[in-house]
């Protein structure tokens, strides 16, 4: 099986190297790359990431153990493979559907390069078996997306980019302080390492007080990047000012990659200090995020900011799942990551189409979208339905599973609060979106039959249909997908 | 190098680090703050070199050169470029907290740093570990600068102060992180500072100056 091992090692290197090469090519061939290629560079990179993720998932399930390369620097267990495939599929949705069909303005090489590097950085983050490298990759996502957020060069985009870079970098700097302290703890225990596979296999006698401080700082830092309240203030600005496909990527997967970092920290620290402190931190942040998101969605005036706050809501759900812990809650959290990524990417891409067609995303200026522009409104409505947590979409099943897991673990009050807040968020989102999309033309005599029903869309609709279909069937997951999810959840449930 | 010289050198570097951090908060002139940041970068580089020589660690000595070049030379130059305008030398105009109050806060934050670093101090009684609270204090000072200064370049200085503090903690507690991580972190910090420098000049072009109080259009 040595040849197979080498093959999988190469697959492990593929996402990072191909993203780097594509990025350098897109930026380096400035002006000489055909527009068509520049438009689809991101989709190509995402397809490579998705392919690698699926291949690694198959290999991990087949061999029953993790795939490693570069003497263990890169490592894919079931969790890493699942996250990589999620980055790929959400990235493919956002970049393929988000690629504009119009010839003007010509696609910018730096935009294409940065999107590809962004995908590469996220891939490294989930494949590295080293908390330090994970940190470097998460910080690299901030660097790659800084100019993407400021891409439109308006005052608002500039403001959003500034806040995003400062708050994002300071937040993850705190996480780095935590990682440094964890390294100091392993060093004084005789095994100087930042690799979680080494820590899981050797169980060095770490100093609990130091690990407690380290875990608190690391979780606080990565929570900033995850967009958990009260460190979420950069999120609605950045996600509303970035170009729609980038918003989709940032909301759909970048938040989950930062959440993945929290999960890894948790799994390293839990055997030493137990779960109580981290559970309290995550539960507080989760409930606070749900509350903040609900309050700010009720009075929201902008479609993209509305979707951004919906992301705060969903990372709140993820934090609560992490607070619950255990195989069921973890599998549900990962299913939630996939479902939310697909739905949010679809929602942001359709919000971008709304902006192209209507020239605004102000909710007050948008009316009767479903009867006037069904080509754009249908994917938007379907995606929002998924985000509301309605069946058949997988978010319904993952939320139910998290609540069930919480009750099983004796966290009834926490789950009751979560359900109450989720209901509030549901009402807030419906109240804001319904007036924009529903309604009949006859109610609006000024516009009577002046515009024909417009079924067109400014981008490819097929990826959105596929993404929504996947989000709809993922909840009824069976076969290898379930094995992968439970395998990934088992990686995190290292017993103390 | 004898043990007592080693302990004295570590103590001296830590003292320079803390003193420069205090002076950064005290001074109002941006060029002076940048010069102090460069001094701090040199002190950190020398500290790493001392640790490297004491432990006979070649890798750590190379890291010392990297730290000297990055934090002592390159980053201060980038910051200086960010301050160059047609208006000449820059001062912090509207501090949210005045100097006296800032200095009192520094004293409180230093005490807090000693409280926070208790788990680290419990690891042993070597001279690097004894100096760890200095790193935490610098990190907290960085936060203070970030949250009370409204000039774009001041925020950059606050971020670098925070980063120097974390670097100090890393070198004093664990002799630095693994080399591959150290390289990645240095590259990340350099890129973040370059990006913020570009954004600063865009803000200046757009709003006339680099006062962040103008950045208040995005809110709910």
Image (spheres, coloured by chain):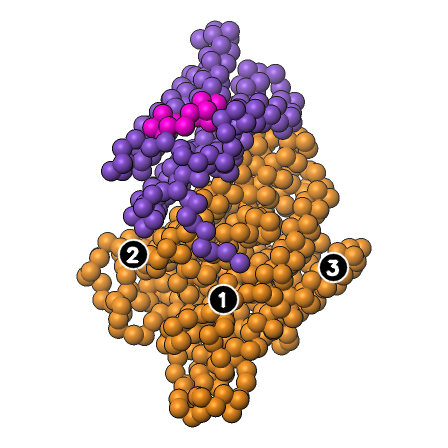
Chain colours: A orange, B purple
Nearest the eye: A147 or A337: A147
Which one is earlier in the sequence, the residue at label 3 or at label 1? 1
Image quarter of residue A449 = bottom left
Dot in front, 3 or 1: 1
Disc 2 and disc 3 on one polypeptide chain? yes
**Tag 3 residue:** A417
Instruction: Give neighbour class at mark 1: few <14, some 14-19, many 20+ (Cα, 10 Å).
Output: some
Q: Is residue B123 visible?
A: no
Residue at 60% x, 73% y is A431
Q: Which mark is residue A157?
A: none
**Which residue shows up at 39% across the image and 24% down it?**
B36
Q: Which numbered marker is on residue A110? A: 2
Q: Position of residue B143 (x, y in %)?
A: 52, 35
Residue A357 visible in the snapshot: yes
Q: State the residue in front, B194 or B199.
A: B199
Q: Which mark, by number, is residue A302?
A: 1
For disc 1, the chain is: A
Residue range corresponding to the magenta coloring: B22-34
* SS assignment for the magenta stretch, majority: helix
Q: What SS does tag 3 mark?
A: helix
**Residues marked 3 and 1 touching at CB (< 8 Å):** no
Q: Quadrant of residue A22?
A: bottom left
A12 versus B148 height, above or below: below
Instruction: Give me the C-alpha separation between circle 1 and circle 2.
Output: 28 Å
């Amino acid at each position: 099986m040595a040849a197979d091992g080498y093959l999988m090692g190469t697959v492990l290197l593929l996402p990072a190297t191909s993203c780097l090469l594509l990025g350098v090519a897109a930026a380096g061939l400035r002006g000489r790359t055909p527009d068509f290629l520049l438009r689809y560079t991101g989709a190509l990179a995402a397809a490579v990431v998705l392919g690698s993720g699926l291949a690694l998932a198959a290999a991990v399930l087949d061999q029953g153990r993790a795939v490693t390369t570069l003497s263990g620097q890169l490592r894919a267990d079931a969790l890493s493979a699942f996250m990589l495939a999620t980055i790929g599929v959400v990235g493919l949705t956002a970049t393929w559907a988000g690629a504009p069909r119009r010839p003007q303005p010509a696609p910018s090489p730096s935009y294409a390069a940065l999107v590809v590097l962004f995908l590469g950085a996220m891939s490294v983050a989930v494949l590295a078996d080293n908390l330090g490298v994970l940190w470097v990759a998460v910080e690299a996502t901030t660097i790659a997306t800084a100019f993407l957020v400021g891409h439109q060069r308006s005052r608002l985009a500039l403001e959003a980019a500034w806040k995003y870079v400062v708050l994002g970098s300071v937040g993850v700097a705190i996480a780095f302080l935590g990682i440094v302290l964890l390294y100091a703890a392993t060093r004084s225990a005789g095994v100087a390492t930042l690799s979680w596979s080494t820590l899981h296999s050797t169980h060095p006698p770490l100093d609990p007080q130091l690990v407690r401080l380290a875990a608190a700082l690391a979780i606080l830092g990565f929570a900033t990047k995850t967009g958990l309240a009260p460190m979420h203030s950069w999120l609605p600005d950045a996600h509303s000012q970035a170009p729609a496909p980038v918003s989709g990527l940032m909301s759909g997967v970048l938040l989950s990659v930062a959440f993945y970092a929290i999960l890894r920290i948790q799994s390293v620290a839990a055997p030493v200090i137990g779960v109580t402190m981290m559970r309290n931190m995550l539960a507080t942040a989760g409930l606070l995020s749900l509350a903040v998101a609900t309050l700010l969605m009720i009075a929201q005036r902008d479609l993209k900011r509305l979707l951004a706050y919906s992301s705060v809501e969903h990372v709140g759900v993820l934090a609560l799942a992490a607070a619950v812990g255990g195989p069921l809650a973890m599998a549900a959290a990962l299913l939630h990551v996939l479902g939310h990524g697909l739905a949010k990417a679809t929602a942001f891409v359709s919000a971008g189409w709304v902006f192209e067609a209507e020239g605004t995303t102000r909710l007050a200026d948008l009316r009767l979208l479903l009867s006037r522009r069904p080509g754009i409104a249908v994917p938007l409505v379907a995606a929002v339905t998924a985000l509301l947590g309605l069946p058949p979409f997988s978010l319904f099943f993952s939320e139910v599973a998290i609540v069930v897991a919480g009750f099983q673990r004796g966290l009834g009050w926490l789950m009751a609060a979560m359900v109450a807040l989720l209901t509030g968020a549901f009402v807030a989102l419906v109240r804001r979106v319904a007036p924009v999309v529903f309604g009949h033309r006859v109610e609006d005599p000024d516009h009577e039959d002046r515009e024909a029903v417009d079924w067109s869309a400014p981008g490819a609709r097929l990826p959105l249909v596929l993404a929504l279909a996947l989000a709809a069937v993922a909840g009824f997951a069976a076969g290898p997908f379930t094995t992968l999810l439970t395998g990934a959840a088992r990686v995190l449930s290292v017993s103390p | 190098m004898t043990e007592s010289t080693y302990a004295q050198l570590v103590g001296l570097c830590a003292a320079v680090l803390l003193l420069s951090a205090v002076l950064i908060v005290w001074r109002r002139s941006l060029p002076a703050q940048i010069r102090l940041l460069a001094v701090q970068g040199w002190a950190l580089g020398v500290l790493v070199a001392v640790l490297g020589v004491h432990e006979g660690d070649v890798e750590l000595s190379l890291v010392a050169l990297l730290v000297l070049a990055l934090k002592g030379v390159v980053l201060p130059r980038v910051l200086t470029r960010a301050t160059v305008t047609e208006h000449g030398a820059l001062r912090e105009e509207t501090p949210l907290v005045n100097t006296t109050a800032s200095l009192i806060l520094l004293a409180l934050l230093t005490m807090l740093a000693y409280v926070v670093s208790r788990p680290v101090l419990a690891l042993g009684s070597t001279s690097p570990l004894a100096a760890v609270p200095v790193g935490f204090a610098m990190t907290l000072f960085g936060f203070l600068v970030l949250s009370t200064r409204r000039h774009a370049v001041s925020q950059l200085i606050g971020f670098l102060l925070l980063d120097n503090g974390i670097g100090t903690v890393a070198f004093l507690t664990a002799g630095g992180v693994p080399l591959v991580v150290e390289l990645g972190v240095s590259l990340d910090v350099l890129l973040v500072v370059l990006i913020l420098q570009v954004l600063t000049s865009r803000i200046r072009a757009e709003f006339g100056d680099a006062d962040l109080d103008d950045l208040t259009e995005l809110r709910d």
